[in-house]
Amino acid sequence: MNPQAKLIFATSLLMGTTITISSNHWILAWTGLEINTLAILPLISKSHHPRAIEAATKYFLVQATASALVLFSSMTNAWHTGQWDITQLTHPTSCLILTSAIAMKLGLAPFHFWFPEVLQGSPLTTGLLLSTAMKFPPITLLYMTSQSLNPTLLTTMAILSTALGGWMGLNQTQTRKILAFSSISHLGWMAIIITYSPKLALLNFYLYTLMTAAAFLTLNSMKVLKLSTLMTSWSKTPTLSAMLLLTLLSLAGLPPLTGFLPKWLIIEELTKQEMAPTATIISLLSLLSLFFYLRLAYCSTITLPPHTTNHMKRWHTNKPVNTSVAILTTLSIMLLPISPIILTIM
């Protein structure tokens, strides 16, 4: 793709996100979301492969529907209350429609079906943007309207997301689809806590972004798109494979790593809200995701391919690792000891 075109799309993405997160008026927030959608479409379809075009079309249709619902919800609220302010969303029907629209934008169950397909048709770098930066504006809208939303509906969607994200990821062999189901599962954890502790949901999103960026960039630098390729990557970049193992275990939320922090805090907050059964259910459902993270980790580090693959064996190269990958993997592994400082900043 032309560098000037890339710059325009990147600037538009930045501008759309900034407009949405800094606006108080629904029309401005909607405009930012639309700019974002239009800017990411060429990045999804840039390879001109039929799969990429299909992904871009699906993404456009889903996002256009969700944007129309956001507009409809804000207009209904303005009709009944005379308020266009984002924080003044008080009408129950508007809250219900907005929750559905944001769930559709994020890929929360039961509106999650488009997300794995779109991610599978996109390059890894665009997939990273779709999994992190494109989810920031909708999460911000949820954060700003959190006091008006229906906790029962969000809890149901959250448990459904965690369950489906875990179950549907179990039999996948494509790394992008596995990361898509991982994203759906993580969104469940954010949705369950957003009405009780919005700051905690944002902290979860930041740490999820950090770990997902580390995983995507590591897979991108190893040029890995499916598990069979991941099995032969050990001979090429042993250190990077070992770091990928730790990053995946961090995404799974295992204790000594960064990913344990948001899960621990969310379970603690749910227990304070007298929702211990819900906390137990969502914790048990996250074991499903742990299985496919362990499967990825097993393929990348612990095992050698049991049969001859169609891929050429690549020998160890002395090519230096990208600095951003090194920083992100380190942060996604080692932030747990400084959790008191993170909580103080919050």
Image (cartoon, rainbow, N blue to C red):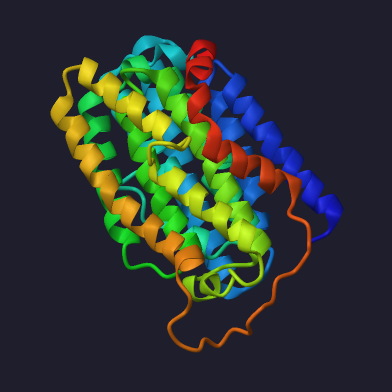
Q: Nearer the viewer, residue 326 or 242?
A: 242
Asked if residue 21 lies left or right of residue 78, the reply is right
> Residue 167's x, y, as percent?
27, 57
Quarter of the image for residue 162 reads top left
Compared to residue 181, the image places residue 237 above or below, namely: below
Rendered view: 114 above or below 141: below
In the current view of this chain or complex, which residue is farthest to the left?
Answer: 277
> Residue 95 is drawn in which quadrant?
top left
Residue at 32% over, 57% down: 291
- Judge from the rendering whether residue 187 lies leftward or rightward of residue 38; answer left or right: left
Q: Let me know if residue 223 appears in the view.
A: yes
Total numbered circles? 0
Report the residue at 40% width, 29% height from top: 262
Say which residue appears at 43% left-offset and 59% top-offset.
Answer: 178
Q: Is 44 positioned to the left or the right of 287 in the image?
A: right
Q: Where is residue 87 drawn, in percent x and y?
A: 44, 13
Q: Nearer the viewer, residue 246 or 4?
A: 246
Quadrant occupied by the N terminus: bottom right
Q: In the rendered image of this protein, does residue 341 appear above or below residue 17?
A: above
Q: Percent from the top left, x then y, of residue 71?
A: 46, 31
Residue 144 at x, y = what percent? 45, 18
Instruction: Find residue 88 and report its image quarter.
Output: top left
Determine whether, in the image, residue 120 is placed left or right of residue 287. Answer: right
Is residue 117 something that shows in the picture?
no
Q: Which residue is pictured at 38% across the width and 47% down the height?
A: 184
Q: Nearer the viewer, residue 123 or 110?
A: 123
